Image: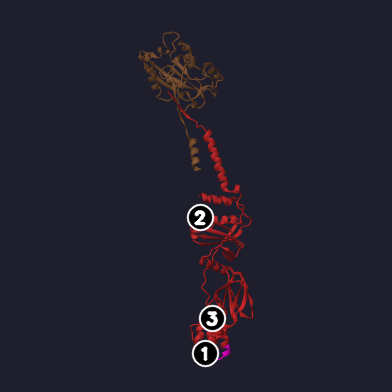
């Protein structure tokens, strides 16, 4: 009860802005431990919720390849090529599915028959991507063509390729994960290459380049929207990364869709942080169920609300009143003489 | 904080009971000279041997005790100081007449020779009822009168000094502030003091 009274008193003593300041509130962890978030004078609180995890987007690449292989087996090269034409090879490699890309290219070479030049070009492309041959046989002639192309690509001189973009973004080339962090320079075989970059706070991006036609390239990334930021933030938590490190607060700011967001994590206690304009400006811990107190403290510490002056704080008056009572009590104890009841008798 | 408040309230609420014993003389064994005055008409006899109190072998009288408020003044013990202090008419009985202490006492005349025993007997009997359960907190004096006047009369009217057979009073005091027994006395130089007894009993301002 005392705590509640003090909370109300603090709120009553605080100077409040003319217009409530919008503040997004994100709560995760044990919701019951966080408790109910009540109204705070001067703040316009609105809770944001993370979007539910989405299933991976449907991909028809496998279907197309199966269809192409069936057509190839039936000698229907035209149908095979039509099926393969729907495969977005850049997309497949960008997401790191090198085996699927390899299968598509091997079938592409096989179905190009009798266009030998087309088949060789496809084989060279596979070799240029550095893809391993899939566990799939086509024809001995195509197998030999692929082997030759791989051997030639392996012997060809490498060319350097400087890649720029969002600093720190992870670059993968032709579906190989973790090649380097941007900006960086890599040596690649002649031919087509798929550059894919990912960075928290940005939408993934990919680009097809041809070496040695280009020796430097910038792979631009668009800032992540709130939904993607929320997904990336959740993924980071799943990887055990801190919720409010530099990247975490950037994502929190993006997912809030506003300039201020309070993050509350419920556990044995409440861990709370305030992010303003993409920067962590305050953090605190609070007891079970004290979400409102935690947010108010964050607002004070982060400068969103003005903390009441000393004389506006209840503790000041409680201490002053307590001291006055003690002094008065001491004076009374020293000076007071109770009126005795005098009983008179023989 | 709560403990301090409780302690303060307890201190404020604390009432001290202060008991004072009244002695009819300088000590418990000896009566004041004011109760041993002799008759003017027959200096060989005590006032207590007057026919209105001595019947056969039994002495019967009433003891009246008054608490006289001195109106905020605290004069000295001498009679003239008390009279001077009460001249403006500020001295009054601290209790209503109806509530005056009045108790009948009787003893066999044979006990007169053993005064300590007699005093203990009388005092023990008088102690059966208190003079006051909450004496006033201010300057007062106590006066004890031995009289043949009935308690009914005493409770409804003035003391008749002519019926008094003994009288003694205390020094003015604030009863809440003193400890120990209060001795009553009468300021006389010899035992021919009937008139002084009457003056004591008829102290005009208070009866």
The circle on residue A131 is 3
On whether residue A45 falls in the magenta region, the answer is no
Give the magenta part as a residue range. A114-118
- Chain letter of mark 1 equals A
At mark 3, the secondary structure is: loop
Other residues around mark 1 within 10 Å, as few (<14) / some (14–19) / many (≥20): few
Quarter of the image for residue A81 reads bottom right
At mark 2, the secondary structure is: loop
Main SS class of the magenta portion in the image: helix
Marks 3, 2 in one chain: yes
- Give the image location of residue B47, x and y in percent: 43, 12
Identify whether A48 is placed above or below B23: below
Which residue is more in the foreground, B130 or A162?
Answer: A162
Residue A254 visible at all: yes
Quarter of the image for residue A257 reads bottom right
| Residue at horizontal 50 percent and vertical 86 percent from the top | A69
Labels 1 and 2 touching (C-beta < 8 A): no
Image hue for chain A: red
Which residue is more in the foreground, A177 or A113?
Answer: A177
- Give the image location of residue B114, x and y in percent: 37, 15
Please name which of the two marks, 3 or 2, marks the residue nearer to the observer: 3
- Chain letter of mark 2 equals A
Which residue is identified by label 2?
A: A287
| Residue at horizontal 53 percent and vertical 50 percent from the top | A5
Which residue is more in the foreground, B50 or B73?
Answer: B73
- Give the image location of residue A320, x and y in percent: 57, 43
On whether residue A117 falls in the magenta region, the answer is yes
Image hue for chain B: brown
């Amino acid at each position: 009860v005392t705590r509640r009274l003090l909370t109300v008193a603090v709120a009553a003593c605080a100077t409040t802005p003319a217009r409530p300041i919008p503040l997004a509130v994100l709560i995760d962890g044990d919701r019951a431990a966080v408790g109910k978030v009540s109204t705070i004078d001067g703040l316009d609180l609105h809770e944001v919720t993370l979007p539910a995890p989405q299933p991976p987007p449907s991909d028809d690449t496998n279907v197309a390849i199966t269809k192409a292989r069936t057509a190839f087996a039936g000698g229907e090269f035209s149908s095979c090529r039509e099926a393969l034409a729907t495969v977005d090879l850049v997309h497949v490699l960008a997401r790191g599915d090198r085996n699927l890309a390899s299968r598509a290219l091997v079938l592409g070479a096989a179905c190009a028959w009798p266009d030998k030049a087309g088949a060789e070009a496809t084989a060279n492309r596979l070799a240029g991507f550095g893809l391993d041959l899939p566990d799939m046989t086509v024809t001995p002639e195509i197998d030999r063509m692929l082997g030759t192309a791989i051997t030639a690509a392996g012997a060809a001189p490498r060319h350097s390729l400087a890649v720029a973009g969002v600093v720190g973004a992870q670059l993968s080339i032709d579906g190989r994960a973790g090649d380097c962090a941007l900006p960086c320079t890599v040596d690649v075989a002649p031919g087509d290459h798929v550059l894919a970059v990912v960075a928290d706070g940005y939408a993934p991006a990919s680009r097809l380049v041809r070496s040695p036609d280009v020796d430097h390239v910038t792979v631009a990334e668009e800032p992540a929207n709130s939904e993607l930021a929320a997904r990336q933030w959740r993924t980071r938590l799943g990887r055990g990364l801190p919720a409010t490190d530099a990247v975490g607060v950037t994502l929190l700011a993006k997912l809030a869709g506003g300039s201020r967001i309070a993050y509350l994590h419920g556990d044995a206690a409440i861990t709370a942080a305030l992010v303003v304009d993409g920067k962590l400006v305050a953090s605190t811990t609070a007891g079970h169920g004290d979400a409102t107190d935690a947010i108010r403290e964050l607002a004070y510490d982060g400068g969103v609300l003005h903390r009441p002056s000393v004389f506006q704080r209840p503790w000041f008056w409680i201490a002053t009143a307590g001291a006055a009572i003690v002094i008065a009590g001491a004076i009374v104890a020293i000076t007071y003489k109770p009126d005795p009841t005098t009983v008179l008798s023989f | 904080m709560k403990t301090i408040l409780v302690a303060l309230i307890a201190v404020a609420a604390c009432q001290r009971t202060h008991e004072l014993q009244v002695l009819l003389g300088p000590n418990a064994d000896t009566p004041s000279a004011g109760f041993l005055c002799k008759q003017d008409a027959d200096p060989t006899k005590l006032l207590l041997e007057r026919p209105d109190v001595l019947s056969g072998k039994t002495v019967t009288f009433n003891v009246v005790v008054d608490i006289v408020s001195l109106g905020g003044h605290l004069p000295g013990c001498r009679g003239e100081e008390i009279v001077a202090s009460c001249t403006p008419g500020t001295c009054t009985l601290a209790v209503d007449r109806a509530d005056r202490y009045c108790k009948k006492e009787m003893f066999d005349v044979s006990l007169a020779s053993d005064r300590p025993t007699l005093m203990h007997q009388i005092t023990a009997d008088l102690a059966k009822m208190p003079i006051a359960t909450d004496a006033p907190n201010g300057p007062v004096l106590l006066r004890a009168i031995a009289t043949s006047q009935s308690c009914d009369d005493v409770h409804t009217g003035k003391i008749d000094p002519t019926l008094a057979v003994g009288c003694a009073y205390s020094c003015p005091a604030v009863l809440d502030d003193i400890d120990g027994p209060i001795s009553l006395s009468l300021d006389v130089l010899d035992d021919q003091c009937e008139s002084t007894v009457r003056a004591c009993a008829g102290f005009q301002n208070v009866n």
